[in-house]
């Protein structure tokens, strides 16, 4: 497979992942962290870091808006819920194991 084809496929898969996460507003970031070890904020941070590595200026807020599909504050007010005691405990345990 040509490098450009692989890059195109990876970019398409990334766009599908972002679209999927934008559609699944019922899935909380803490659930993603507990199950997969990353969340929307991680993905937006990676996006901004890769932009910076290539000399492209992408702010934290712009990267988050790209991943969330709206300003982060708006997403939080519409969709973020308070983490349950169980979610917090699972996050704490996972943090100890991978920290």
Image: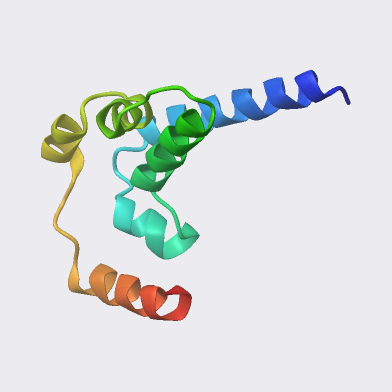
Residue drawn at point x = 19 percent, y = 40 percent: 79
Residue 8, horizontal then vertical, whole percent: 69, 20
Examine the image and state in which quarter residue 60 appears: top left
Q: In terms of depth relative to the viewer, which is nearer, 13 or 43?
A: 43
**Residue lying furthest right:** 1
Q: Nearer the viewer, residue 78 or 66?
A: 66
Q: Position of residue 71 (x, y in %)?
A: 21, 27
Q: Could you tell whether 27 is left or right of 99 in the image?
A: left
Check the image and report above or below for 31 versus 43: below
Viewed as shown, does residue 90 lie left or right of 53?
A: left
On screen, 43 above or below 94? above
Display coloring? rainbow
**Is residue 11 shown above or below 31?**
above
The image shows residue 92 at horizontal and vertical percentages of: 30, 76
Residue at 32% over, 31% down:
68
- Residue 98 in picture, x, y percent from top left: 47, 74
Q: Quadrant location of the C terminus? A: bottom left
* Near-viewer residue (30 or 3): 3
Q: Name which quarter of the figure residue 90 lies in.
A: bottom left
| x 49%, y 58%: residue | 36
User: Looking at the image, how many numbered discs can be counted on the residues?
Assistant: 0
Compared with residue 53, is residue 41 higher up or lower down, i.e. above or below?
A: below
Q: Residue furthest front?
A: 55
The quarter in which the N terminus is drawn is top right
């Amino acid at each position: 497979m040509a490098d450009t084809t692989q890059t195109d496929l990876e970019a398409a898969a990334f766009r599908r992942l972002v679209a999927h996460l934008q559609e699944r507003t019922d899935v909380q970031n803490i659930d993603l962290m507990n199950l997969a070890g990353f969340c929307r904020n991680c993905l937006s941070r990676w996006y901004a870091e890769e932009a910076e590595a290539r000399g492209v200026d992408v702010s934290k807020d712009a990267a988050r808006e790209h991943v969330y599909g709206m300003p982060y504050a708006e997403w939080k007010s519409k969709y973020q819920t308070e983490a349950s005691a169980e979610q917090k405990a699972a996050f704490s345990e996972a943090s100890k194991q991978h920290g």
